[in-house]
Image (cartoon, coloured by chain):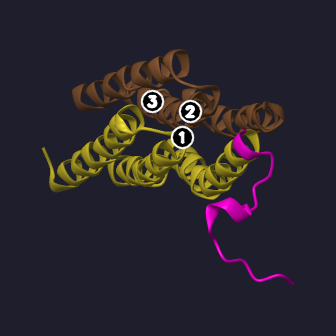
């Protein structure tokens, strides 16, 4: 199981640069970072479920993917109105 | 380690590498449009990770969930990238269509 844990740790660590872009760059660039972070987080949850051999935990990834999509759409609406 | 495990780990490694390339591109690029190009490798990464789970576990609940996540990302990611570029342009210029000062010839309908 070591390889799956390592992959999950790398994916979780990959969220840090996304957070940095959200904090330090413009709103539009932050939205792109949120979009990417949603995908990375869903994959991290999926790989973690596999690493821990707990299949029901995979539901978290299945729920996060569409919620992240909907959340980004809301931010896009705000971005359109920002001038 | 069996051949099947080795293939699964190779796919997993490739998938994680794709995600890392996407994140590095996001950090390294200059503006929002350049950064948007790096959402693509993340989609490929999702497909590779789902394939790794399929190879490692065979047909199972977690493999099905992996496929669902990858399929959703595959469909949603290009739509979101398009929406983000459109929203960023509207935010910058007030309209997504090219203006006359940009020097882009557009045929009027």
Proximity of marks 1 and 2: CB atoms separated by less than 8 Å: yes
- Spatial CA distance of label 2 from label 3 is 22 Å
Tally of marks: 3
Q: Which residue is mark 1?
A: B32
The one nearer the camera, B103 or B10, is B103
Nearer the viewer's eye, disc 2 or disc 3?
2
On the picture, is A81 further left or further right than B5? right
Q: Residue at x 64, y 26 (%)?
A: A27
Q: Which residues are magenta?
A: B92-109
Whether residue A82 is situated above or below residue B53 in the rendered picture: above
Residue, far left: B1
Colour of the chain lettered A: brown
Chain letter, disc 2 residue: A
Residue B98 horizontal/vertical position (percent): 71, 62
Extreme residue in the front direction: B101
Which residue position is annotated with label 3?
A44
Callout 2: helix, strand or loop?
A: helix
Q: Quadrant of residue B23?
A: top left
Name the residue at 63% across, 33% down.
Answer: A28
Tell me, for residue A29, which label it has, or none: 2
Residue name at image x 47 percent, y 25 percent: A18
**Horizontal arrangement in the rendering, residue B64 relative to residue B18 (left or right):** right
């Amino acid at each position: 199981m070591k390889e799956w844990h390592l992959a999950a740790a790398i994916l979780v660590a990959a969220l840090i640069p996304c957070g940095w872009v959200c904090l330090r760059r413009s709103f539009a660039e932050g939205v792109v970072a949120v979009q990417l972070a949603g995908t990375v987080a869903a994959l991290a949850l999926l790989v973690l479920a596999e690493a821990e051999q707990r299949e029901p935990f995979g539901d978290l990834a299945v729920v996060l993917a569409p919620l992240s999509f909907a959340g980004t759409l809301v931010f896009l609406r705000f971005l359109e109105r920002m001038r | 380690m069996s051949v099947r495990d080795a293939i699964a780990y190779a796919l997993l490694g490739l998938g994680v590498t794709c995600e890392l390339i996407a994140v590095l591109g996001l950090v390294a690029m200059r503006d929002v449009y350049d950064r948007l190009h790096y959402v693509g490798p993340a989609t490929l990464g999702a497909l590779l990770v789902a394939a790794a789970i399929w190879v490692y576990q065979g047909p199972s609940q977690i493999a099905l969930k992996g496929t669902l996540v990858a399929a959703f990302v595959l469909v949603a990611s290009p739509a979101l990238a398009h929406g983000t570029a459109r929203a960023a342009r509207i935010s910058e210029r007030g309209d997504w269509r090219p203006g006359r000062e940009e020097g882009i010839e557009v045929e009027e309908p």
